Amino acid sequence: MWPENELTARLGIDVAIIQAPMAGANTPALSAAVSNGGGLGSLGFGTSSIEDASRQISEHTHASNRSLNANFFCHDEPQGIEDGSAEMRKQLQPWYDELNLGPVPEARAVFSTFGPGHVEMLQALQPKIVSFHFGLPEQGLFDAVRDTGAYILSSATTVSEARWLEARGVDAIIAQGLEAGGHRGTFQGADPSTQPGLFALLPQITSAVKVPVIAAGGIADGRTIAAALALGASAVQIGTAFLRCPEANVHPAHRKALAEARDDQTRTTKLFSGKPARGLRNKYMDTFEASEDLASPFPSQLALTVPLRKGVSEDEMGDVITLWSGQSAALSREMPAAELLNILVEETEDQLNRLANRRK
Ligand SMILES: Cc1cc2nc3c(=O)[nH]c(=O)nc-3n(C[C@H](O)[C@H](O)[C@H](O)COP(=O)(O)O)c2cc1C
């Protein structure tokens, strides 16, 4: 009953489970464990240098001879940073003063969008799958990625975005429901308050496009995987549930928050990076909630918020760092990735059998 379809064949996987790319939190140990287990391991390089990305791809390849999904951000480079960040810097100064951090630094783009250097790396290393977040790179770069032979994925948070991605030639679309942890892949400007949850978004996207659709957002156990498959997904992409694996690079304060998380504790916010992303609420988010629209354009807001961690003790770290999480953190379990993958597969099979045999 576990689906084998065009997508799983093209991804080269046995079970239709993708460990979500999670820039900063994913590691080659995590991606290799998932790929070796028959799922698809991913490495998100949105915040990495090209050298670091190359090193991580090589590490994955040493640890696993199975597919890898290399993931990149293709945001617009930020404009008008200086003017845009002045008011935000003013608001943050009292916190900087209290933490003895001196003046709030100038906002600046702390990493670059997908560009020709990334293409050269892909040409050299040829990962089988390449995925993008925040839309797609311009056509010339997209065509160059296609010429490497890569199967190409990108996230949609609305039906309109899914239609656009299909028209631009992606091979499969990730339907990212509002429940999802981390950054919204939104690239047509929809406000998160208008974006559908996965239960509404997934069937509408599968009806609107012909390419395979991958479900993401709030999926964390066999019930949620079976539900996504029933709604028309060809595979699922799971982020938050893999954050508690020892292979993930997650700060202890973040691990603790995930272990204690309840369903009503996350919110989307632009306050950390400048783009909406879902995380567990903390002191920083709550304090500056009313100033969210002052956030400097992505990713330059990070230059203002990352230094806060230098001023706090380990005990207070959870107050200031990003605690990215989807709405299903309470369903997540602390265990090695290979074990988690096996359990997810077993639970999904049980659910699918249970549904097939149900009499009423
Ligand atoms: C910590 C974290 C980091 C993320 N970073 C990325 C990323 O770099 N690229 C990407 O395409 N998606 C990223 N996402 C979003 C995931 O691809 C996916 O949409 C999301 O994790 C699904 O929801 P879930 O967390 O409830 O499983 C991230 C998610 C989390 C939790």
Image: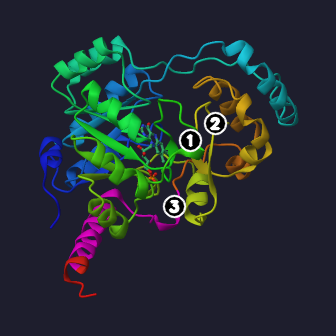
| Towards the viewer: 167 or 331 | 167
- Of badges 1 and 3, nearer the viewer stands 1
Q: Left of 359 or right of it: where is 187?
A: right
Residue lying at the far bottom of the rendered structure: 359
User: Cβ of disc 1 within 8 Å of ligand 1?
Assistant: yes
Which picture quadrant has residue 148? top left
Task: Give the magenta part as a residue range.
Answer: 327-353
Mark 1–mark 3 distance (CA, rounded to whole Å): 15 Å
Is residue 315 shown above or below 349? Answer: above
Q: Give the residue number, with chain letter if any, for mark 1.
A: 277
CB under 8 Å between callouts 3 and 2? no
Task: Assess disc 1: are there few (<14), some (14-19) or many (≥20) residues with their C-alpha within 10 Å of its C-alpha.
Answer: many
Task: Assess disc 2: are there few (<14), some (14-19) or many (≥20) residues with their C-alpha within 10 Å of its C-alpha.
Answer: many
Mark 2–mark 1 distance (CA, rounded to whole Å): 6 Å
The residue under label 2 is which amino acid type? Lys
Q: Position of residue 170 (x, y in %)?
A: 26, 31
Q: Residue at x 29, y 66 (%)?
A: 226
Secondary structure mostly seen in the magenta stretch = helix
User: Disc 2 on helix, strand or loop?
Assistant: loop
Q: Give the residue number, with chain letter if any, for mark 3.
A: 329
Q: Give the residue number, with chain letter if any, for mark 2.
A: 270
The residue under label 3 is which amino acid type? Ala
